[in-house]
Structures are given as structure tokens and as C-alpha cells.
Image: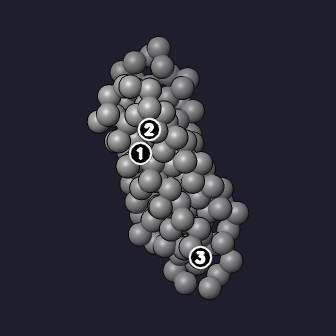
């Protein structure tokens, strides 16, 4: 198996942290008396994100495809927001750049070798 590239590790760590924060946020929502549906949705999405991050660490191409789909959707949404809602131009630009960088890191030559093996 090829060595995991640093860029893949970075994306996996960020996904892991995101999933963990979503789970914590969902639990806080549930214990705070807010909408149970919202809290459980956050917990489920956080758990899925957490599991996908573990797949990235292990070299799962399915996890890479799932994360790529999310990045593409984030990129489309960010570009739309920059055009349609000028007040959020800068945050949307940052979101677009993060999604683009994430995609680039997941499809470098080294990343392709890692996910292929």
C-alpha cells in the first residue's frame, strides 16, 4: 500500500474534526431542549462524516468519492452565493477556496496512488 500523502491526511483530519464537532453540537442541541429532529440530524450527519474521515485515513476510494461530491456541492453553492448574495462574497469565496483546495489535495498523483492501492 502506498504511503498516505499529507494532503489526504489533512482532509481526513479536517473531516474527522468536523464530524466530531457536529456530534457534539447535536448532543448539545438535544440536551438544550431545542428541536430533537435538528439535534438527531446533527448527530447522524456528524457520525457519517466521522466514519467517512476514517475511510479517507484507510484509503477508501468510496470515502474519497463521497467527500469529493460534498466539496463539489460546496463549491457550486459558494459560487452561487458570491453571485446572488453580494453581502456574503468574502465568506463564500473562502468556502469556495477550501472546497477547491480539498478537491485538489484528494486528486494529486500521490493521492491517486494511495487510493488505488
| Spot occupied by residue 30 in the image (x, y as percentages of width and height) | 40, 34
The tag earlier along the polypeptide, 2 or 1, is 2
> Does 93 sit above or below residue 15?
above
For image coordinates 41% across by 45% down, the residue present is 43
Q: Which residue is mark 3?
A: 114
The first of marks 3 and 1 along the sequence is: 1
Place residue 4 in its image quadrant.
bottom right
Coordinates of residue 78 in the picture (x, y in percent): 44, 33
Badge nearest the viewer, 3 or 2: 2
Q: Position of residue 53 (x, y in %)?
A: 53, 60
Residue underneath mark 1: 43
Distance (Cα) linking label 3 and label 2: 33 Å
Pointer 2 local density, CA inside 10 Å: few below 14, some 14–19, many at least 20: many
Residue 105 visible (yes or no): no
Question: To which residue does mark 2 refer?
Answer: 26
Q: Quadrant of the N terminus?
A: bottom right
Residue sitting at x 55%, y 52%: 15
Left or right of 75: which side holds 9?
A: right
Residue 27 on image: x %, y %: 46, 39
The residue sitting at 46% across, 72% down in the picture is 61
Please say if the residues under marks 2 and 1 sit with CB atoms less than 8 Å apart: yes
Q: Considering the numbered disc 1 on the image, is that residue within a helix, a strand or a loop?
A: helix
Q: Tell me which numbered mark, 3 or 2, is placed earlier along the sequence.
A: 2
Which residue corresponds to the image point at 55% horizontal and 48% vertical from the top-left?
20
Q: Are marks 3 and 2 in contact (CB under 8 Å)?
A: no
**Element type where label 3 sits in the image:** helix
Amino acid at each position: 500500500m502506498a504511503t498516505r500523502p499529507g494532503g489526504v491526511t489533512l482532509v481526513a483530519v479536517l473531516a474527522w474534526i468536523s464530524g466530531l464537532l457536529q456530534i457534539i453540537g447535536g448532543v448539545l442541541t438535544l440536551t438544550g431542549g431545542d428541536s430533537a429532529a435538528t439535534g438527531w440530524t446533527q448527530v447522524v450527519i456528524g457520525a457519517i462524516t466521522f466514519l467517512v474521515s476514517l475511510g479517507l485515513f484507510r484509503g477508501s476510494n468510496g470515502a474519497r468519492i463521497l467527500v469529493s461530491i460534498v466539496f463539489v456541492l460546496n463549491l457550486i453553492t459558494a459560487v452561487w452565493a458570491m453571485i446572488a448574495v453580494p453581502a456574503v462574497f468574502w465568506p463564500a469565496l473562502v468556502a469556495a477556496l477550501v472546497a477547491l483546495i480539498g478537491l485538489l489535495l484528494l486528486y494529486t498523483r500521490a493521492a491517486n496512488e494511495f487510493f488505488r492501492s
